[in-house]
Image: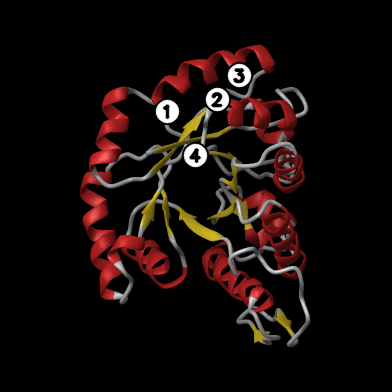
């Protein structure tokens, strides 16, 4: 099982360059970065984990800039977002950023897609009707796929965004990056995964014993090859028993949570996590 990591990189933490080099040197499989463009001070949306919102949420580095630095100083390390809030981006610009990063890194990028939880943040990006954010996410993902298509492909979306058939290069190294959907287990999410993604990125990885058979059934019912489904437990605090359980369930990659700390703290945790590789 591949062991990857995720961390809230900020202006106060270890740098992307130092972290990426240390990860590759120790044999870790990948680095996934989260995204928040800003956190409105006047916020009524509660923090999903409860309590006060941790400091790092308002100080997060742009994941694509940070991953570009990581790509430049590594050769094998996987690069991913955990997750990208597609509704907070212009999809044409985002498609170009993703294609460029994947092309320059030799196909090492994974697009983790999420729907978000912070209504005020999303509203500042024009997501006024919160109930439509999932449909809007997939509408914009479809537009991006049109730009990644091998031949010029037009797309007219449900929410008024469209793109003409266009020359849009570079293309992602494999035609499109690996796409993993985040979110809580449920029939709607699993249907989306089976229709539009390469797999699921469940936060914490709890409840997989019960939910994985349901996802696999939906995957196969959609005509997908059962061997191709990828389930990547995300932001996991590891233990030998937990990782063995994921391996028994058929997970081929797990993403371990690093603390949003300085160089010394992060490298100490990396040394401990290296025992799982």
The tag on residue 266 is 3
Q: Mark 1 and mark 2 in contact (Cβ < 8 Å)?
A: yes
Q: Quadrant of residue 216?
A: bottom left
Q: Is residue 192 above or below residue 208?
A: below
Say which element carries label 1: loop
Left or right position of 182 against 88: left
| Nearer-the-camera pick, 143 or 179 | 179
Left or right position of 128 against 217: right
Q: Position of residue 5 (x, y in %)?
A: 53, 34
* Foreground label between 1 and 3: 1
How many neighbours does mark 2 have within 10 angstroms: few (below 14), some (14-19), or many (20 or more)?
Answer: some
Mark 4 or 3, nearer chain start: 4
Q: Is residue 129 above or below residue 88?
A: below
Q: Is residue 254 above or below residue 222?
A: above
How many neighbours does mark 4 have within 10 angstroms: few (below 14), some (14-19), or many (20 or more)?
Answer: few
Distance, label 1 to label 3, CA atoms, is 17 Å
Name which residue lies at 72% across and 60% down.
89
Say which element carries label 4: loop
How many neighbours does mark 1 have within 10 angstroms: few (below 14), some (14-19), or many (20 or more)?
Answer: few
* Foreground label between 2 and 4: 2
Left or right position of 61 against 198: right
The tag on residue 26 is 2
Mark 2 or 4, nearer chain start: 2
């Amino acid at each position: 099982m591949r062991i990857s990591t995720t961390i809230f990189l900020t202006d106060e933490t270890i740098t992307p360059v130092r972290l990426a080099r240390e990860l590759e040197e120790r044999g870790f499989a990948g680095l996934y970065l989260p995204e928040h463009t800003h956190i409105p001070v006047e916020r009524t949306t509660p923090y999903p984990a409860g309590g006060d919102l941790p400091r790092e949420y308002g100080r997060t580095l742009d994941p694509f800039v940070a991953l570009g630095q990581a790509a430049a100083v590594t050769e094998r390390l996987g690069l991913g977002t955990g997750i990208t809030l597609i509704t907070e981006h212009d999809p044409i610009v985002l498609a170009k950023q993703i294609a460029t990063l994947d092309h320059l890194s030799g196909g090492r990028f994974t697009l983790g897609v999420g729907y978000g939880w912070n209504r005020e943040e999303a509203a500042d990006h024009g997501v006024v009707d919160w109930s439509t954010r999932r449909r809007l996410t997939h509408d914009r993902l479809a537009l991006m796929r049109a730009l990644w298509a091998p031949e010029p492909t037009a797309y007219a979306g449900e929410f008024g965004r469209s793109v003409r058939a266009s020359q849009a290069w570079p293309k992602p190294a494999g035609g499109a990056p690996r796409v993993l959907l985040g979110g809580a287990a449920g029939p709607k999410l699993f249907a989306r995964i089976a229709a539009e993604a390469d797999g699921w990125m469940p936060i914490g990885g709890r409840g997989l014993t019960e939910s994985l058979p349901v996802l696999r059934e939906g995957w196969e019912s959609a005509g997908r090859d059962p061997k191709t489904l990828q389930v990547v437990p995300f932001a996991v605090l590891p233990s030998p028993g937990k990782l063995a359980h994921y391996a028994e369930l058929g997970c081929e990659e797990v993403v371990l949570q690093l603390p949003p700390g300085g160089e010394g703290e992060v490298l100490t945790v990396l040394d401990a996590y290296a025992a799982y590789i």
